[in-house]
Image (spheres, rainbow, N blue to C red):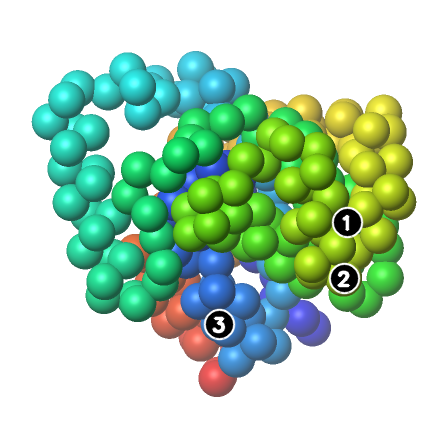
Amino acid sequence: MTISIDYYTFLGSPWAYLGSRRLEAMLTRHGATARIIPMDAANVFSVSGGLPLAKRAPQRQAYRLVELARWRDFLDVPLTLQPKFFPKPEALPARLVIGLRDAGGPDAGANAIRLAHAVMRAVWAEERDITDDATLDAILAENGFDAAACRAAAESEAVSQAYAQGTEQANAAQVFGAPSYVLDGEIFWGQDRLDFLDRALARRTGK
């Protein structure tokens, strides 16, 4: 039986971006899958006691930049520490990802994760505005998706409800930040916990 994890994320998270490609490679190596669940950051923070970046203490904000630079260089992943178009509302990109995830078919989950990574890369490496309609359409087209069809799905009531339900599911699972990977009820918070997730998957798959 294929092992699946729940992958909770904010599409504006640089940490989720740093871990995205490694997660995909790990899933392939173990023959596992992931169900990506974009969350409403404001809701999750309000429930868990977290603070949006702008409200954090100056020393925390400064150290965040130090850590981002360390991980960027260590992983050799292109990342702009203070991108031009961050933070930006994530609801529409999140619904686009959910629309792909819930479209059905064997590639739906992988397609959704691929689009999520492209959105994150647009913010953190390409200085693109993910709230701009033309930019979103271009990102969809560049990744082989039909922009019009994706937008129609994203605007559906079912996808809007799925976005809210995903946030509720995150709160119920006691997820408090992104990225969070949940395997059999165990939370691995942060891209720096991917090695622990890798070992947990290896114990289950023998790979």
Q: Are marks 3 and 1 in contact (CB under 8 Å)?
A: no
Q: Nearer the viewer, mark 3 or mark 2?
A: 2
Marker disc for residue 159:
none
User: Do we see residue 181 in this rendering?
Assistant: no
Task: Label 2, secondary structure: give it.
Answer: loop
- What number of labels is visible? 3
**Sequence-first tag of 1 and 2:** 1
Q: Residue at x 21, y 51 (%)?
A: 69
**Sequence-first tag of 3 and 1:** 3
Q: Which residue is mark 3?
A: 26
Task: Label 1, secondary structure: give it.
Answer: helix
Q: Position of residue 40 (x, y in %)?
A: 55, 26
The front one of 177 and 69 is: 69
To which quarter of the image does residue 56 belong? top left
Task: Point out the image quarter for the N terminus.
Answer: bottom right
Q: Are marks 3 and 2 in contact (CB under 8 Å)?
A: no
Q: Position of residue 127 (x, y in %)?
A: 45, 43
User: Do we see residue 129 in this rendering?
Assistant: yes
Distance from the alpha carbon under mark 1 to that under mark 2 = 12 Å
Q: Nearer the viewer, mark 3 or mark 1?
A: 1
Q: Position of residue 67 (x, y in %)?
A: 19, 47
Q: Which residue is mark 1?
A: 100
Please rate how many residues cluster around mark 3, counting C-alpha atoms within 10 Å: few if below 14, some from 14 to 19, many from 20.
some
Q: Which amino acid type is shown beneath numbered disc 2?
A: Gly
Does residue 9 sit above or below 146 in this rendering?
above
Q: Which amino acid type is shown beneath numbered disc 1?
A: Leu
Q: Which residue is mark 2?
A: 144
